[in-house]
Every structure is written in C-alpha cells, then in structure tokens.
Amino acid sequence: MTGAVEGPFGGVGSEDETLLLDAVERFLAKDVKPVAHALEQADEYPAEIVEKMKALGLFGATIGQRYGGLGLPATTYARIVERVSAVWMSVSGIFNSHLIMCAAIERFGSEAMKESLLPRLAAGELRGGIALTEPDCGTDLQAIRTRAVRDGDHYVVNGTKQWITNAAEGNVLAVLVRTDPETTPAHRGISLLVVEKSAGYVARRLKKLGYRGVDTAEVAFQDVRVPVAGLVGDQEGRGLQQILSGLALGRINVAARGVGVADACLQSALAYAQQRHTFGQPIASHQAIQLKLADMATRVEAGRLLTDKAAAAYDSGRRCDLEAGMAKLFSTEAAVTNAMEALRIHGASGYSSDNDVERFYRDAPLLAIGEGTNEMQRIIIARQLVERAEG
Ligand SMILES: Cc1cc2nc3c(=O)[nH]c(=O)nc-3n(C[C@H](O)[C@H](O)[C@H](O)COP(=O)(O)OP(=O)(O)OC[C@H]3O[C@@H](n4cnc5c(N)ncnc54)[C@H](O)[C@@H]3O)c2cc1C
C-alpha cells in the first residue's frame, strides 16, 4: 500500500508543514467559521469556500507534484482534515472522495490518463468523487449492477448509483461498473471508469440528516457513452481492487474527520462547562461533568494517535488496512460518543439548532457508515490479526 509521494515537501513537523497548517487555520477562521452555520442550516453548497480551497491547493493535496499537486504525505493530509472537520466536516467531504478518485488514477491509470486528468483535478477545475454504492448494495460491492458494454471505442453505461458525494456539484466521477456479468469470482468482471459529467449522467441531490452543504446524489446513467480511454488501467476486471486500495487513504481521512469532530465537541463542552453555573458553581466543578470531559479528551487523544500511526504506515508503503481500520473505527465512534456527551453537557441549549453541538450530533453518525461501515472495520481488523499471526 504505497502512499509515499516523492517531492520537496519537508514532511511531518517540518517548516513546510507548519506553514501549510497555519494557512489552513487562517482559511478556516476567515472563510469557513463565519459562514458554516448559515450554509449548513440552508443546506447550501459552499461555492465560495470551494474557490478558496482551489487556491490553497487542497484539491491536489495528495497528488504528486509532477502532476501539479502538493504531494503531501498522508500524515500531513490527516492533520489538515482534522482541522477542517473541527470547523465544518462537510468541507472535508468536498476534497476527500475527490482525492480517493485521484489516488486510483495516479496509481493505476495510464501515463496518458494521468497527464490529461491529474493537473486539472489538482487545480480543482475537474472535481468529483467515487461512485460505488447502488440502491441495492453498498458494503457488498461485488453485487453492483451498473453495466458498461463495449461498443467500438466507447463503453455504453447503464445503471443507477446512490449516495454519491460531489456528483451534482462536481464534474467527474470514478464509476465502478460491471464490464463482464458472467465471470466468477464476480470482482473479475468489475472495472473502474472515469466519466466526465459532459458524457451525460444525471445527478439528483438527496436530503440528509447531517453532512449538509456538500451534495450527495443519486446518479442515473442511461446509455451514457464513455470513451475507452476512461478505463483505469490497461485491462478490464481490476476495478474493485483499484478502488479498494484507495479506500485506505479514505479511511485515514475519515478517522481524521472523527478526531476533528470529537475534538470540536470536547472544546465546545469544556468552554460551556466553565461558563454555565448550577448550585452556585460552574458545572465543570461537578464530578459527573468532569468524568465526561476526561473521557472525551482521552478519546480525542487516542484517536489522534491511532490516525497518525495509520497515516505513517500508509506513507511508509506498508500494507495498512489493520491500522487504518483501527483508526477509523475508534476515531469515528469517539466522534459519535463525544457528540452525544457534548449535547448532554450543554443541556437544553445543546438541543438548539443555533448551537454547533447540534450539528456535530447530526454529522457524526455518517462517519460510522462511510468508507466501510464500522461493523466491516471490525471484520477487516480481525481478518488482518489472523493473517499477520499466521505470518
Ligand atoms: C452521506 C453519505 C455519503 C456517501 N457518499 C458516498 C460516495 O461518495 N460514494 C459511494 O460510493 N458511496 C457513498 N455513500 C454510501 C456508503 O459508502 C454506504 O452507505 C456504505 O458503504 C454502507 O452501504 P449500505 O448503506 O448499502 O449498507 P449495507 O451494505 O446494506 O449494510 C447495512 C448494515 O449491514 C451491515 N453489514 C453488511 N454486511 C455485513 C457483513 N458481512 N457482516 C456484518 N455486518 C454487515 C452494515 O455494517 C450495516 O450496518 C455515502 C453514504 C452517505 C450516507
């Protein structure tokens, strides 16, 4: 599992990283924090924030520098994602699935595909994500039905994808398709196609509990003609493996989001507990509240360490599904639990939609579902434990 990108970026703890994280903090304070609440409540796409993200280079964060990206290691990338998610998790969704698609193209695409797509993806001129899930399957991706039939120098794509982030506002998707319905095992008949919106797919935005602002859509493909040059790699039947290997980076990203949300819950609860008084004392001096704060802080710290460890394993090029699975599982459950605890510490005011903790409480559960559910993470972790024990 290689994530290491060659380039002059100084790496973790370097001056480069400090400067970059400072720039991200300034962007969050100036361009995201003041508008996040209103945009989230209105479920409005943050178009101006996206323009600023392009200028910061976030759409090319993990793309190699030779293709116009920043070439960041996963460790630095995770630190950016944590900071962004602590302010507004939806913003991190706009570049995460985009970068999973980019990782698949960079690792498995032909040189011609990389040269034609990656510079535009890094600049944010092309933006999009991954279209895997369908109405009848999400975890069991071998059951997908979307078909791509070869017709001369094109594929003709028919089918429906569901819950696809960035499909409506973006303009390109990496789509998991069935190119051979007969082959067994089924994954050998599954391929990955890069499809630009101009080819003719139709995206319809879905309504959601949280994770608002960023678009998540149902995508209909009806006789959509895609040039064969859109096939990732030089052979059909490799799509599932190509996209699953990109999901390790996706899981590290979701783990970092979990740390960000869990920390935002802690900071909000800590501030409120010092300011709110009952029985003549700040509630922070009641032991019942102290116990909650201590557990919340410990979860944040443990999640951050697991995420950093998983990102370092990814950067070293080692197989890291065990580490990424543990980081994703722990940090996202930490976000779910901390959101509930923050809400309780806030009492009735936590239940108000004027309060950010109400948003954290609606955003956090997605983290337990996306990039492989937490039930599946446990299965992946257990399988890896057994495999590594067998040597
Ligand atoms: C807001 C949002 C954004 C999303 N964005 C994207 C996107 O950009 N691209 C994309 O392709 N998808 C996206 N998804 C879909 C997401 O990846 C899937 O929802 C997820 O993979 C789970 O699939 P499912 O919902 O079909 O659940 P199912 O696969 O039907 O699972 C239902 C339940 O059964 C459990 N389960 C399933 N199989 C097993 C098993 N073998 N053992 C134990 N338990 C099992 C699951 O853990 C879950 O609890 C998004 C979803 C949401 C809500």
Image (cartoon, rainbow, N blue to C red):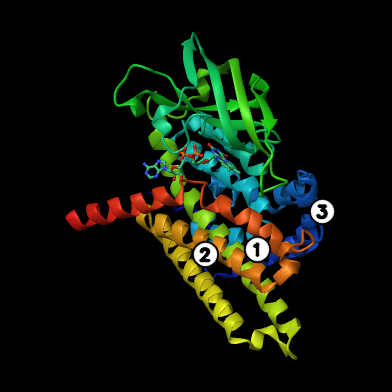
Name which residue type carries label 2. Answer: Ala
Residue where numbered disc 2 is placed: 334
Mark 3 falls on what kind of element? helix
Q: Secondary structure at mark 1?
A: helix
Q: Which residue is mark 1?
A: 86
Q: Quadrant of residue 241?
A: top left
Residue flagged by tag 3: what amino acid is it?
Ala
Residue 343 vertical placement versus 297 (above, below): above
Q: Residues within 10 Å of mark 2 (few under 14, many from 20)?
A: many
Determine if the C-beta at disc 3 is less than 8 A from ligand 1: no
> Is residue 235 visible in this depiction of the protein?
no
User: How far from the left and from the top, in percent, is residue 80?
Assistant: 60, 60
The CB of the residue at mark 1 lies under 8 Å from ligand 1: no
Q: Decide: marks 2, 3 in contact (CB < 8 A)?
A: no
Farthest left residue in view: 390
Q: Position of residue 291 (x, y in %)?
A: 55, 81
Measured in 3D between alpha carbons, the distance from the residue under mark 2 to the one under mark 3, in whole angstroms, is 26 Å
Per the image, the residue denoted by label 3 is 38
Label 1 CA crowd tier, 10 Å (few <14, some 14–19, many 20+): many
Against 260, residue 151 (above or below) is: above
User: Which is more N-terminal, label 2 or label 1?
Assistant: 1
Instruction: Name which residue lies at 70% across and 71% down.
Output: 347
Q: Are marks 3 and 1 in contact (CB under 8 Å)?
A: no
Among the 4 quarters of the image, the one containing residue 288: bottom right
Residue at the farthest bottom position? 280
Residue 116 sits in which quadrant?
Answer: top right
Q: Amino acid at mark 1?
A: Ala
